[in-house]
Amino acid sequence: MNQPSGATEIRLAPNKTGTLAIDFGNTTTVVAFQENGSFEPVLLDLPPISKRPGEIPTLLWQNKNEAKKYLIGQQVFDRGLARTENPSLSRDFKKWIGTSEIAPNHNSELSPQESGELIIHEIWNRIPKHITIQRLVLTSPVESYRNYRSWLHKVCSSFPVEEIALVDEPTAAAMGAGLVPGSKILVLDIGGSTIDLSVVALEGGEGKARPIAQLMRFGGQDLEGKSHQILRCAKVLGKAGMMLGGRDIDRWIANCIFPKTKLTEPLLDAAEKLKCKLSNKLINENKEIIEHFSSVNSGLNDRLILCRRDLEKLLIEKGFLGSLNSLLKEVLASASRNNCSLNDLQAIVAVGGGAQIPLVQRWLMEKTKPIPLLTPPPIEAVAIGALKLTPGTEVKDVLNHGVYLRCWNRRTKKYIWHPLFLAGQTWPTSSPLELILSASKDNQLELDLVLAEPLLKGSQNIIYLNGIPTIQEELIEPKFIEWDYIPKPIKLDPPGQIGEDCLLLRFDINEQALLEVEGKDLRTQEQIQKIQLGPVR
């Protein structure tokens, strides 16, 4: 589609250190880099395997009789090998990695796992030498998260990088669209060969920590099989999909204009470019767009001409909207079985090149109104979201013990211990944990901050990245040891009334491993200046 605007395409200056994100896709793999201390991701150009900066076709060709054993990405297109039915070609295989079955029409001599490993290794080997990768973050389908994670761990085991983390694709897409943790969303992803509709619930929200990528390596130490951290990824409430995508639309366009012509790669590439131009909402729907291409047949016209109105008619005639309607009905029925209706959603997120077609977006808005439709940069949205989930804060250490705050539970009328940060929490934290505290009685004059650390029994071998607590598996109910140091209470002026939300507090851990809090009185908006509550360990 048209070149996205969510990341910068610039030539990197020497000696850059930061985070590399690889969003390994079924059709396109996206590679983005974010320098430490920068908020601007950069799409990496890796010639000759890049189609354009940041975008690498997920293709592999096995050369049996040549010194260069494999062709990767754009190299396959450049040799004219992308549309052959030869077993030497591997394409559309990513969806089978981590699953128990492989499609009957997968006729490549290499397994999906072997093809994926070769492409990821080629990407790694082509990272410019003047870039130092401090952290590598990869994306995973949420349905096959556990098995896909194991595969990626093996693939990346030889990479000389201190930290390797993993994030699920729906969460990354939502973060790339700027959604808040805890949201329930519908994600429409129209890639080159597939359409996926998912209803997902994001981690976090309501006083819980925001989601973040999971560690596979930390401090140079391999964590696979050593950490008991719970999988923290988006919860899929409903999913539907089909093997149809943007490349099929390109075929429809080319066949519509040249119905008796073989669909060559130059012709299909021209159809894709034409589709992208027709997706510009600013052009008149009746304006004809011309796209030139190089023809192998001298007698064939070297131009494709189409207007957006006729493209939309073509998509309707081919049953594209009917397919979307069926998928939407299926995914909402699935979500309903998990107690989630359309009205429970906070946003609709459209990613992938095909989702930028105005007809598709109008259909989506009509079917889901008044829920807002978000359209982050179509190609790199997931990679950008992955970078957001791995902030570039320098990790000093991890907590051996957690820290909890005593809170009054109105329902049970008892005090409970609410977790602020759990064992394995890295510090300094990249973002604060927010809590809203209410009065436990009428005319309450102050609010005590009583802190404790848990005396845990059971499995505790947990490591986590940049400010996010995890929940231990097979954990026996802990006992709590209150801190010897008791912070001064926070005054309530005016006095609080029972059940009244009084304070919004933000807790974090600074570079000296000191727990800090600041916030405001929700009733008067008066700011509460930062208070150091004591050291954590």
Image (tube, helix red, strand yellow):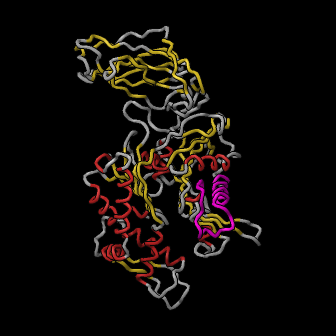
Q: Is residue 94 visible?
A: yes
Tell me if residue 385 comes above or below residue 414 in the rendering: below
How many discs appear? 0
Image coordinates of residue 393 in percent, x first then y, are 53, 33
Is 415 or 294 nearer to us in this picture? 415
Image coordinates of residue 27 in percent, x first then y, are 53, 63
Is 231 or 256 nearer to us in this picture? 231
Image coordinates of residue 131 in percent, x first then y, are 62, 46
Residue 225 lies in the magenta stretch? no
**Outermost residue to the front:** 337
Tell me if residue 485 comes above or below residue 159 in the rendering: above
What is the span of residues highlighted in magenta in the rendered image?
97-125
Residue at horizontal 55 percent and vertical 30 percent from the top? 472
Please state if 286 lies on the left or on the right of 155 as rendered. Answer: left
Residue at horizontal 63 percent and vertical 47 percent from the top? 150
Residue 124 lies in the magenta stretch? yes
Where on the picture, by quarter, is residue 93? Answer: bottom right
Quadrant in which the N terminus appears: bottom left
Tell me if residue 330 comes above or below residue 337 in the rendering: below
Q: Is residue 352 visible?
A: no
Where on the picture, by quarter, is residue 224? Answer: top right
Image coordinates of residue 252 in percent, x first then y, are 43, 77
Please state if 531 lies on the left or on the right of 138 as rendered. Answer: left
Where on the picture, by quarter, is residue 408? Answer: top left
Is 62 or 265 nearer to us in this picture? 62
Quadrant in which the C terminus appears: top right
Tell me if residue 127 comes above or below residue 276 in the rendering: above
